[in-house]
Each structure stands twice: as structure tokens, then as C-alpha cells.
Image (spheres, rainbow, N blue to C red):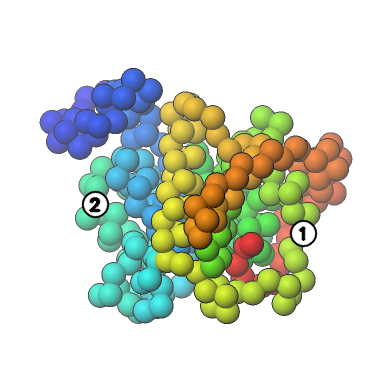
Amino acid sequence: MDFNEQQIERYSRHIILSEVGVEGQQKILNSKVLVIGTGGLGAPAAMFLAAAGVGTIGLVDADKVDLSNLQRQIIHQTKDVGKLKVKSGEETINEMNPDVSVVTYHSFVDSSNILDIFKDQDYDFIIDGTDNFAAKFLINDACVMAKKPFSHAGIIRFNGQLTTYIPDNDTPCYRCMFKEPPPEGAVPSCREAGVLGVMGGVIGTLQATEALKYILGIGESLAGYLLTYNALTMEFIKINIKKNSKCPVCGDEPAIKTLIDYNGPVCTL
């Protein structure tokens, strides 16, 4: 635990916390977190994880920065328009904290690559920052099969939700709550319905919080709960969710044993 003077100063507000201290900060520096999607949710999550000193951050995204992204995707700047999102994210994190190693994956996740991406750095925690049901069900199923803890979240208009899955902890997965993707046309996209830019900051930061608590082994996670947020009424509601013994992926007799590539609508509420 040989911190240099700059690291002691950089992480001093962590180190003085009794729940973190020097040992906890070392855990953070040794940890590896994969952020899938560097958009509205993944952008603030990745930035706060980098600021906290997470030693390795993986960024997965196949898109380029678009001007319409900048209203909420704060890891990107105007000068980055047209640049690969993973490259823009890597540059921002490198400028923020030289202690962090960034691994980029310029790709959409699908059944053929997601488990290999998990294994690439043996990530400790997965953050689902995607905006479509196909990716969310894929990430859930892959995390259950690979026994990887992850944070799910979704935002649209003025609403957000999130939950955490921890393997071997008898907690429900995403499919315990939502068995399968909705039919096309049932849910509007963010492009159609809109989203208040700060929603990504609120919910994405909570995802980063869940990751850091898991790494540190402190507090109570959202495993077993769905947390919803309404920005117009400023209400958080924490809903207790039970594990479904008949869940097709994490239940007693799972029917889904291979990963599925769905097609479907974007946005998640």
C-alpha cells in the first residue's frame, strides 16, 4: 500500500472515511469495472469511477459522438463530435486520473462477444449503461451465467430506475422482474419521448455508487430492490423484489442456457 504523495492528496477524502481508509482505497485501485455503453448513464458512471480511482475501467460502445448526445453524455465534449465514443471516453478519463487504465471495446455487445469481454480483464463489476432492451436482457443473462455482479438502470423523460444483481446471494435478476423484452412499438424511444439530461447524471451516479460499495464491501446494495426516481415530484421509491424460482435464467430449473440476441425497441421504462 505504497501511495505516493499525489495519491494521498487525491484520495484524502476517501482515506479519512472509516468505511474506506487506506485499505479500502487500495481495493478501489485494484478493482476492475466494465461500463457497457458510454451514453447518458455510462458517461457519469465512468467519470465518477475514474475519479474514485478504480484501477481498470472497460468502456464498450460502437457509436460515434453526436451533437445530440452532449445534452446528457458528459464524458464527451463539443470537440469530440464525430469521434468514437470509447476513444472520447478514454481521453476524458486519462485527463482526469492517470492512475486509471482504460480498456476500450469499439463494438456492440452480443452473444458472440460479451462473455469474452467479461473475461478479458476478469472484471469485478459490470455497469449496464445501455439504452435498449435487447442489450439489457443480454447483459443480465451473461452476468447470471458468468456469475458477475452488475447494476441495471434505465431512464426516459423524467423517470429513472435501477437495481443491482449479486450472484450467489439469492437476489433477483432483471428477468425476475421483466421476463422478456416488450413487443416493438410498446415503448417509445428516448428520441421519440425525450429525456431530461440530468437524469443520466442522477441514475448513472447511483450505479457508480453501487459498484464502489460492492468493491469496498460496505453498506446495503440494491440487490433485491428496484429503486425508481421521478424528477418532477422528486420522489424515490424503493420496491422490494423477490427472486422468482421460475425465472428462466436464474431460477431453480433455468430454461435459458445460451445467450439470446433480441431485436427490439430502445429505452428502458
Q: In screen coordinates, is 34 left or right of 167? A: left
Disc 1 element: loop
Residue 209 sits in quarter? top left
Identified by mark 2, the residue type is Met
Q: Is residue 105 left or right of residue 116?
A: left
At which x and y percent is residue 130?
54, 61
In the rendered image, residue 218, in percent from the top left (x then y), is placed at 47, 26
Residue 264 or 209: which is nearer the viewer?
A: 209
Instruction: Say the numbered circle drawn on residue 64.
Output: none
> Which residue: 62% across, 63% down?
268
Quarter holding residue 32: top left
Say which quarter of the image contains residue 22.
top left
Which quadrant is the N terminus positioned in? top left
Name the quadrant of the C terminus.
bottom right
Q: Is residue 205 above or below residue 135?
A: above
Q: Residue furthest left?
A: 5
Q: In this orientation, does residue 60 appear?
A: no
User: Can you name the residue that lies furthest to the top here?
Assistant: 18
Q: Secondary structure at mark 2?
A: helix
**Residue for badge 2:** 96
Q: Are marks 2 and 1 in contact (CB under 8 Å)?
A: no
Q: CA distance from mark 2 to mark 1?
A: 39 Å
- The residue sitting at 69% across, 44% down in the picture is 173
Q: Is residue 138 above or below residue 150?
A: below
Q: Which mark is residue 180?
A: 1
- Amino acid of disc 1: Glu
* Crowding at mark 2 (Cα within 10 Å: few <14, some 14-19, many 20+): some
- 8 and 110: which one is in front? 8
Precedes in sequence: disc 2 or disc 1: 2
Name, please, the residue furthest toward the front. 233
